[in-house]
Image: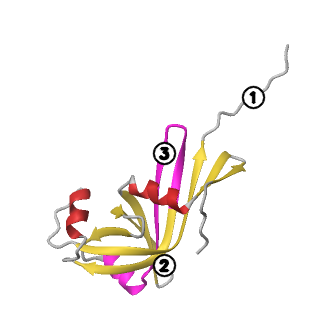
Amino acid sequence: MVMITEDLDEWSPQGPVTELSVEHCWKLLDGSTFGHLGVSVDNQPEIFPVNYVADGRSIVFRTARGTKLRDLIANSSVVFEADAQLENGAWSVTVKGIAEVLGADAPVANEVDVMLPQWVPTAEFIYVRITPTDIRGRQFERQLRLVIRPAA
């Protein structure tokens, strides 16, 4: 895993881009609770929306029995992405890692349940932890395009 220890300013044709440090990525993840989980089974990619909790070392989300759980059990290598629009730009953080099913009675269950909304009544939540093998983030600054016209 390449560890970026400080934010690095860059430029792209779309405007200024900052490659975020690992610490900055975790701060952004900690400030959000909605992301997307990507899995692959039989060479077929799938993506699922999830509510999550980040603790600076891992990401925990809850789910129920079904496609998402079955897919990540079949292949525990996953990718997770969270992003947000800002007043003058956006950020995006991608985490590649290994998913581990913690079960319905995981020690983190109470903390996760307090922090996350319960959208759909579920008979039994199952908790999953993603342990990162790679984490990368970028912040994009929206720029106004200036049109310079010759003086009349």
Depth-wise, is mark 1 or mark 3 nearer the camera? Answer: 3
Above-or-below relation of 142 to 20: above
Depth-wise, is mark 1 or mark 2 nearer the camera? Answer: 1
Q: Which residue is mark 2?
A: 44
- At horizontal 28% and vertical 69% (from top left) the residue drawn is 62
Magenta residues (range): 67-93
- At horizontal 32% and vertical 78% (from top left) the residue drawn is 69
> What is the distance, in whole Å, between disc 1 and disc 2 at their CAs?
45 Å
Left or right: 105 as drawn, with respect to 60: left
Disc 1 residue type (three-letter)? Val
Point out residue 125 in the picture as x, y percentages from the top left corner: 21, 72
- Residue positioned most to the left: 123
Point out residue 119 in the picture as x, y percentages from the top left corner: 22, 57
Q: Which residue is mark 1?
A: 147
Q: Residue 104 falls in which quadrant of the image?
A: bottom left
Disc 3 residue type (three-letter)? Gln
**The magenta stretch spans residue 48:** no
Q: Which residue is mark 3?
A: 85
Q: Residue 100 falls in which quadrant of the image?
A: bottom left
- The answer to whether residue 83 is visible is yes
Above-or-below relation of 1 to 11: below
Q: Classify mark 2: helix, strand or loop.
A: strand
Left or right: 48 as drawn, with respect to 44: left
